[in-house]
Image (cartoon, rainbow, N blue to C red):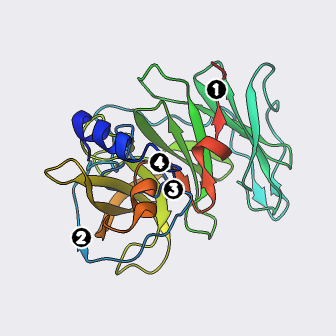
Amino acid sequence: MLTRTAATAAAALLGALALGSCGADQPTAVTPAAPVPSTSSLPPAPTTTTTAPSPPGTTAPAGGTAVAATTSAAARTSSGCAPVGTGVPAGATSKQIVDADGDGRPDTGWISGGTNFGITTASGASFSIPMELAGGGPRSVLVENTDGKGTIAALASDGRTVELLLVRNCGLYPAKNPQAQNYEFDLGFRGTGTGVGCSQVAGTSGRSLVGLNVHLDAAGQPQDVRRTQIIIDGTSARNGATDTVAAAGNPAAVQSGTQISCGELTMSRDGVTERN
């Protein structure tokens, strides 16, 4: 993860680069958890397994309680979630997001009151959850299909931390780490991560959510990017395999290591952002 001084140095180096990220259970960027790049897959590198429950950009900080969806879970069918709830609240900031309920149609994500994130599906179901973020920055949420196989995650950020929320059975739930705490990514403020993304870590079977952590050399220049696979099981998340991608001659890897993204999706372009 980047220290505040390291984060400042990295920011200066990447000032002219477009941001993009890919992250997992590892050091990520900007919040106490990690971001995802638009170039979601980085070249494979040596892999080692990590069991640290809350490394840079993987597990969440202490505290954090599971919060059930604010609407009763609707049955999911081939036609999507059954229509329940009241739709997008008046005054909420909303944006089209990926298909969250598997019916093949894009859905709508929204932020209401600065504290609640919700999804209203094309089928008419609405469900939401409070965001447990302590930072004072505007909230933004990127909804993504982390593995391309229907594992839907919502990455909620306040600019310092990324809270991992999961869509399950037509409801939104906070992911829990092995210590039963909310799973979060660091974005450079705790020194454990610099970004979050989606990519295939060396030695694993396919794409997954990953925590990213850009390491600097003695001169303050990016040396490599550590990627940590995040294994999602129901509403639980834990760190999996890790690998390292060299930064030299690979500016895309460095860019992706300091953002929140997944594949072609980036928080800045595709996320739902709270009005200032």
* Residue 127 to residue 169: above or below: above
What is the secondary structure assignment of the residue under circle 2?
strand
- Give the number of the mark in front: 3 or 1: 3
Q: Which residue is mark 3?
A: 37
Residues at circles 3 and 4 in contact by the CB criterion of under 8 Å? yes
What element does badge 3 sit on?
Answer: loop
Give 217 or 245, whichever is nearer the viewer. Answer: 217
Label 2 packing within 10 angstroms: few (<14), some (14-19), many (20+): few
Query: Around disc 3, counting alpha carbons within 10 Å, would you say few (fewer than 14), some (14 to 19), or many (20 or more)?
Result: many
Amino acid at pointer 2: Thr
Q: CA distance from mark 2 to mark 1?
A: 37 Å
Per the image, the residue denoted by label 2 is 49
Q: Position of residue 132 (x, y in %)?
A: 46, 28
Closer to the eye: label 4 or 2 = 4
Q: Are marks 1 and 4 in contact (CB under 8 Å)?
A: no
Q: Amino acid at mark 1?
A: Glu
Q: Residues within 10 Å of mark 1 (few under 14, many from 20)?
A: many
Q: CA distance from mark 3 to mark 1?
A: 21 Å
Q: Residues within 10 Å of mark 4 (few under 14, many from 20)?
A: many
Residue at the spot x=31%, y=76% of the render? 45
Q: Is residue 184 above or below residue 196?
A: above
Residue beneath disc 1 = 274
Distance from label 4 to label 2 (Cα)? Answer: 23 Å
Whether residue 187 is visible: no
User: Which of marks 3 and 2 precedes in the sequence?
Assistant: 3
In the figure, is residue 263 to the left or right of 200?
right
Give the residue number, with chain letter if any, for mark 4. Answer: 259
